Amino acid sequence: MARVPAFLFRSRFRVHGDSMRPTLLHGDLLHIIPPCWTPAGYPRGSVVVVMSPAQDGAFWVKRVVGLPGEFVTIQGAGGVLIDDSPLPEPYLSHPYHPAEDTPPWLCDGDEYFLMGDNRSDSDDSRRYGPVSSHRIIGRVWLRWPLRRPARSQEPIQ
């Protein structure tokens, strides 16, 4: 019997909930690229599967907003700021304007600031802080059903 690479068994995840709406919908099946295939890290805008920082055994699907070494600030008037510059977010269905400002979060050398696209219904780095890269299971490469195909070098939109 032929041996199948172990990463194939962890390369499929199903979306639960609406935190990535409208990009991903509840029930979508995701195929991911494992971290060993992304040695340079995860570019801003990538969608990743991550072990929940809540330590509840769940897996979350979130978008990379802040990169290692960056300050991320959430401002009511300006949305998300990266090192004091506004972050363009074309993947959001409407502009994000939170109710209150937050102090800046610093993403250390191996941390990413992750947020859901549906900001009003997403537990993410705004609550738990930046996520260490060792908690990231992989980058989303493809979703099923194929409403809008995405490839490994493109953010899912």
Image (cartoon, rainbow, N blue to C red):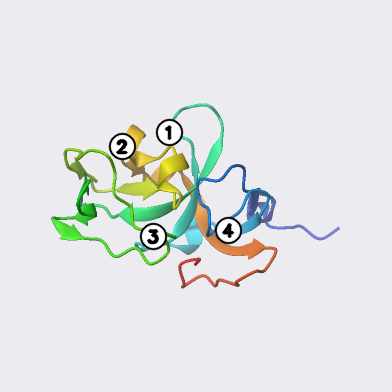
Is 151 in front, or is 147? 147
Residue identified by numbered label 4? 32
Mark 1 and mark 4 lie on one chain; the one further toward the N terminus is 4
55 or 84, nearer to the observer: 84
Q: CA distance from mark 3 to mark 1?
A: 18 Å
The alpha-carbon separation of the residues under discs 1 and 2 comes to 9 Å
Label 4 with label 3: CB-CB less than 8 Å: no
Upstream in sequence: badge 4 or badge 3: 4
Identify the disc placed on residue 28.
Answer: none
Q: Secondary structure at mark 2?
A: loop
Q: Are marks 1 and 2 in contact (CB under 8 Å)?
A: yes
Tell me which amino acid carries mark 2: Gly
Residue under numbered circle 2: 129
Q: Specify the amino acid type for callout 4.
A: Ile
- Distance from disc 2 to disc 4, alpha carbons, whole Å, reads 23 Å
Q: Earlier in the sequence, mark 3 or mark 1?
A: 3
Spatial CA distance of label 4 from label 3 is 12 Å
Q: Which mark is residue 53?
A: 1
Q: Residue at x 67, y 68 (%)?
A: 146
Q: Position of residue 62 (x, y in %)?
A: 46, 49
**In the structure shown, which secondary structural element does the residue marked by tag 1 occupy?**
loop
The residue carrying pointer 3 sits among few (fewer than 14), some (14 to 19) or many (20 or more) residues within 10 Å by Cα, namely many
Q: Nearer the viewer, mark 3 or mark 2?
A: 2
- Mark 2 surroundings: few (<14), some (14-19) or many (≥20) residues within 10 A: some
For the point 51% across and 54% down, which residue is it?
138
Amino acid type indicated by mark 1 = Pro
Q: Which residue is mark 3?
A: 42
Secondary element under disc 3, as helix, strand or loop, is: loop
Q: CA distance from mark 1 to mark 4?
A: 19 Å
Residue at the left extreme?
84
Mark 3 or mark 2, earlier in chain: 3
